[in-house]
Amino acid sequence: MKPADRTFVISGACSGLGLATVRDLHSEGAYIALLDLNEDAGAEIVKELGDRVKFFECDVSETSSVTKAVHGAAEWIKTTGKPMGGVVAAAGVGGAQKIVDGRTGEPIPIEAIDFILNINIRGTLDLVRLCMAHLVKVTPTSPDGERGVLILVASSAAFDGQPGQVAYAASKGAIASLTLPLARDVARYGVRVVTIAPSLFESRMTAVLPEKARKSLERVMEFPVRAGKPEEFASLVRQGVENLMLNGTVLRLDGAMRMPSKM
Ligand SMILES: NC(=O)c1ccc[n+]([C@@H]2O[C@H](COP(=O)([O-])OP(=O)(O)OC[C@H]3O[C@@H](n4cnc5c(N)ncnc54)[C@H](O)[C@@H]3O)[C@@H](O)[C@H]2O)c1
């Protein structure tokens, strides 16, 4: 699908990988519903990019909030006449905490696990299911009957999670695992699913990584020997949108880096 004159619902749209995707699809002529917690950043992006973007405050871990934001996006689509083309579920949180604290012997608080799973898994599925209700009603434009695409975000942690990444790796492994069954569920509607699993990418999330963790990753980079750039992520999202044969798959975007066990 060409992104021009289609509306994409992007969560986590106000920073990092989501924001780079917003800019890229916008530059191709797409309309973007920006879903994020960060209202101030949303206002700045709308000021910069203009009429083809609209901000909807949204906490993906709260169903009432996702429902309201998706409803708002659908109402906006009625006024622009630019049908929904897909979802990029880029809202996500990290977190590094071992299952048992090495110094105190205390287990990780269950709230810390719930926080990550609620945003990264539940939030992704909630957004997808609510948007699907709109995507199934889109009139297909191509001879193949394509209606839209769902782009999900996993991580290298889905495959080689590091110490302290149990909850995060569980959340991203779930996204990787659900990619194929989701693609099978939505295929009959002409909707595809593409999951991207990035390694270390420059973003607000990774800017706060402890030096030791960052160095441990830089040591195992193959080529290129640097963190990925958000634009490189966005460029693969665009390929996911445009290339009809990408479906039901998890694409590692990692320069052959495999995360090590020891830091
Ligand atoms: N940057 C990396 O190295 C990297 C690597 C692998 C996977 N990822 C994944 O990519 C996705 C984007 O991460 P990023 O690096 O761009 O991070 P980021 O922190 O720069 O951006 C995340 C955005 O999500 C929003 N967000 C957080 N919680 C939310 C919630 N409950 N509801 C709505 N919005 C919420 C934040 O406000 C922020 O704008 C995440 O799923 C992350 O796990 C990132």
Image (tube, grey):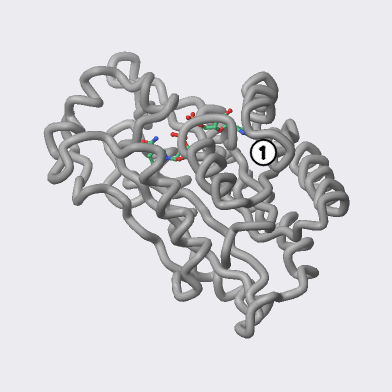
* Cβ at disc 1 under 8 Å from ligand 1: no
Residue 106 versus residue 69: which sits nearer the camera? 69
For the C terminus, the image quarter is top left
Residue 117 shows in this picture: no
Residue matched to label 1: 34
The vertical placement of 215 against 152, above or below, is above
Task: Tell me if mark 1 has few (under 14), some (14-19) or many (20+) residues whose alpha carbon lies within 10 angstroms of its own.
Answer: many
Residue 41 picture location, percent across and down: 62, 23
Left or right position of 189 against 118 = right
Residue 42 appears anywhere in the view:
yes
Q: Amino acid at mark 1?
A: Leu
Give percent across and percent down for residue 114.
56, 35
**Residue at the bottom extreme of this rendering:** 143
> Compared with residue 21, is residue 149 higher up or lower down, i.e. above or below?
below
Q: Please count the marks in the image.
A: 1
Foreground residue among 2 and 190: 2
Q: Quadrant of the N terminus?
A: bottom right
Query: Residue at position x 72%, y 62% from top?
Result: 132
Residue 154 placement (x, y as % from top left): 43, 49
Of all residues, the one furthest to the top in this rendering is: 104
Query: For residue 68, what is the image quadrant?
Result: top right
User: Could you tell me which residue is drawn at 30 percent across and 39 percent down?
Assistant: 228
Label 1 sits on a secondary structure element that is strand
Picture coordinates of residue 226, whole percent (x, y):
21, 34
Q: Residue at x 37, y 22 (%)?
A: 207
Residue drawn at 40 percent across, 38 percent down: 230
Name the foreground residue: 254 vs 146. 146
Left/right of residue 49 with respect to residue 161 in the rendered view: right
